[in-house]
Image (cartoon, coloured by chain):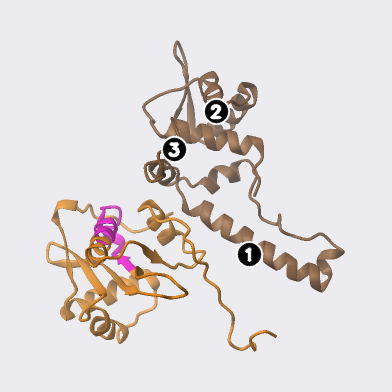
Chain colours: A orange, B brown
Amino acid sequence: MKNTHNLQKVNPHTVIIRNARVIDMDAVAAIDAAITETPKPEYWPRAYHRYATRQGRYFLVAEVDGSVVGFILGEERAWEFGSPPCGWIFAIGVAPETREGGVGTRLFEAICQAMRDAGMTTVRTMLARDDGLNMAFFRSQGMMGGTFIELEMPLDREAGR
Amino acid sequence: MKLQKATQFALLAVLELARDPAEQHSVAEIAERYGISANHLAKVLRDLGRAGLVEAVRGAGGGYRFCGNAKRTSLYDVINLFGDTMEGEADIPAPAGATDIGAALGRVLAEVDEIAVATLKSISLATLIKSMNWAPAATSR
């Protein structure tokens, strides 16, 4: 895992994890754009309303010295192909220059605790096979191959043909 | 998935040394702990030394110690050192591979290999060592 950014040392004790606010969305969008290189300015305000304002959904941010440096999103899902209620994490991002300071770990621990408090006993995520950075991060937090397998097919082909 | 003996020995040895980089272990000590050939292990450790993952410690009580970056070295990196990459293992050789059945079978086997490679690339030595605390306590050091 290579990191070409100039890292700023983050003191883990100064990281505040809190629920996202609508005014955080510009910072969240900027972090996401820096990581994915695909700006989505319209998506993040919608994501705020969809995930930060409803029960069973989680949108947390990490703040250092008044600036948002990371975010994590998740939700409760239940009974998908027999799966009892469980937590799903579907986005995480840490500003590249503040990585390796434990921000991602604090975000992950916080969302897991929130899910635990809500009665969930398992947390899941789904990643691209070649997403080495996130895969290594979630592995380092203790996540392993689970009991479900992701399948897909292009919709320009008729099913069963 | 079957790894060559040298690759298995390398993984065992590098993980044994990486779990406490301050400690050094002799070839005989590691070989005895894992019930493997000391001669074969000695050669494997020399290869790991050339790759910069372990270093020989001279003198009384000498042996090897870990000197790599456990957070930045994946299981796949170690496997790759020994040429045991699994890439292309799923290929169905010609002429069967050129048939429609051979090609379809090859795609399924390639999918299995790709998942195995992605898994091995995502697990660092540090994560694997940490994972020993997550597993049920049925094994001993």
Residue on which disc 1 sits: B111
Q: Which residue is mark 2?
A: B34
Residues at circles 2 and 3 in contact by the CB criterion of under 8 Å: no
Relative image position of residue B125 (x, y in whole percent): 45, 43
Crowdedness of circle 1 by 10 Å Cα count: few (<14), some, many (20+)? few
Label 2, residues with CA under 10 Å away: few <14, some 14-19, many ≥20 = few
Marks 1 and 3 share the same chain: yes
Looking at the picture, do discs 2 and 3 lie on one chain? yes
Residue range of the region highlighted in magenta in the rendering: A92-109
Q: Judge if badges 1 and 2 mark residues of a common chain.
A: yes
Q: Mark 1–mark 2 contact, CB under 8 Å?
A: no
* Foreground: disc 1 or disc 3: 3
Q: Earlier in the sequence, mark 1 or mark 3?
A: 1
Toward which corner of the image does residue B126 lie, by quadrant? top left
Q: Amino acid at mark 2?
A: Tyr
Q: Residue at point 41% right, 44% down? A: B135
Q: Which picture quadrant has residue A40?
A: bottom left
Label 1–label 3 contact, CB within 8 A:
no
As helix, strand or loop, the secondary structure at mark 3 comes to: loop
Which type of secondary structure does the marked residue at label 2 adopt?
helix
Q: Secondary structure at mark 1?
A: helix
Instruction: Give me the disc on residue B138.
Output: 3
As drawn, the residue found furthest toward the right would be: B95
